[in-house]
């Protein structure tokens, strides 16, 4: 079984924030795969479906971002999901808008939701898909991540959401190294 997690914050007030990038990607993955209604379990909204003969769960933790690990570990334990079959999708301040980066391991890069998942799992050896939201050092980090993407960056942002969703779908059946070569970077930088 594969678990694909999109990180974000619950509540209408956060829906359009940069910090909800993971939720936006998961919603698009669900749409691409024909999933319609989220179910609820362990403080999470999820879809359980079969894709290419593989059981897949798409998950949006409904704890706040910094507590995402609580929900993720409950799903992993309940459904007996191995860490190698986990993909976490999150916003990343260190990448420009329009850039995505799939990694097999690494630190949390200051992303507290990812940090909490790493803490609960006891390892940083998990797949993560980083979606660039840029960083404006003039604005406090919390205000920035909870703000909306600027209009002049929206096309690049929407493109990164689309490519991230396709990468997540491909993660179900393709090799991670192949996907890294296919998706890492901006749209005009990656291999065709």
Image (spheres, rainbow, N blue to C red):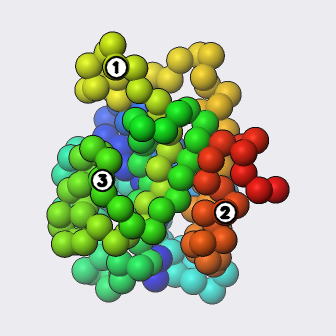
Mark 2 → mark 3, Cα distance in angstroms: 21 Å
Residue 7 image offset from top left, x and y in percent:
37, 49
Q: Mark 3 sits on what residue?
A: 108
Secondary element under disc 2, as helix, strand or loop, is helix
Say whether residue 26 is visible: no
CB within 8 Å, label 3 to label 1: no
Q: Residue at x 48, y 62 (%)?
A: 103
Q: Residue at x 40, y 20 (%)?
A: 136
Indicate left or right for 134 with 185 as reference: left
Mark 3 → mark 1, Cα distance in angstroms: 19 Å
Q: Mark 2 sits on what residue?
A: 181
Badge 3 crowding class, 10 Å Cα cut-off, few under 14, some 14 to 19, many 20 or more, is: some
Say whether residue 141 is visible: yes
Residue 91 sits in which quadrant?
A: top left
Residue 164 image offset from top left, x and y in percent:
59, 52
Badge 1 crowding class, 10 Å Cα cut-off, few under 14, some 14 to 19, many 20 or more, is: few
CB within 8 Å, label 1 to label 2: no
38 or 91: which is nearer to us? 91
Query: As displayed, is residue 185 above or below residue 166?
Result: above
Query: As displayed, is residue 36 above or below residue 23?
Result: below
Q: Residue at x 52, y 59 (%)?
A: 102
Which of the two labelled residues, at mark 2 and mark 3, occupies the earlier sequence position?
3
Query: As displayed, is residue 111 above or below residue 48?
Result: above
Residue 186 image offset from top left, x and y in percent:
66, 42
Secondary element under disc 1, as helix, strand or loop, is loop
Indicate left or right for 141 with 88 as reference: left
Mark 1 → mark 2, Cα distance in angstroms: 30 Å
Which of the two labelled residues, at mark 1 and mark 2, occupies the earlier sequence position?
1
Q: Residue furthest top?
A: 138
Indicate left or right for 129 with 99 as reference: left
Q: Which mark is residue 137?
A: 1
Which of the two labelled residues, at mark 3 and mark 1, occupies the earlier sequence position?
3
């Amino acid at each position: 079984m594969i678990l694909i997690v999109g990180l974000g914050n619950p509540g209408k007030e956060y829906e359009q924030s940069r910090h909800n990038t993971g939720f936006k990607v998961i919603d698009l993955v669900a749409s691409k795969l024909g999933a319609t209604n989220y179910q609820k379990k362990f403080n999470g909204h999820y879809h359980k479906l079969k894709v290419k003969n593989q059981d897949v769960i798409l998950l949006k933790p409904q704890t706040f971002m910094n507590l995402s690990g609580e929900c993720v570990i409950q799903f992993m334990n309940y459904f007996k999901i191995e860490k190698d079959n986990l993909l976490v999708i999150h916003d990343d301040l260190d990448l420009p808008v329009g850039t995505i980066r799939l990694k097999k391991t690494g630190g949390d890069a200051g992303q507290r939701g990812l940090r909490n998942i790493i803490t609960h799992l006891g390892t940083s050896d998990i797949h993560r898909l980083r979606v660039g939201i840029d960083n404006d050092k003039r604005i406090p980090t919390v205000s920035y991540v909870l703000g909306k993407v600027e209009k002049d960056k929206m096309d690049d942002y929407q493109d990164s959401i689309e490519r991230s969703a396709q990468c997540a779908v491909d993660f179900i059946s393709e090799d991670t190294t192949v996907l890294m070569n296919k998706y890492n970077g901006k749209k005009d930088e990656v291999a065709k």
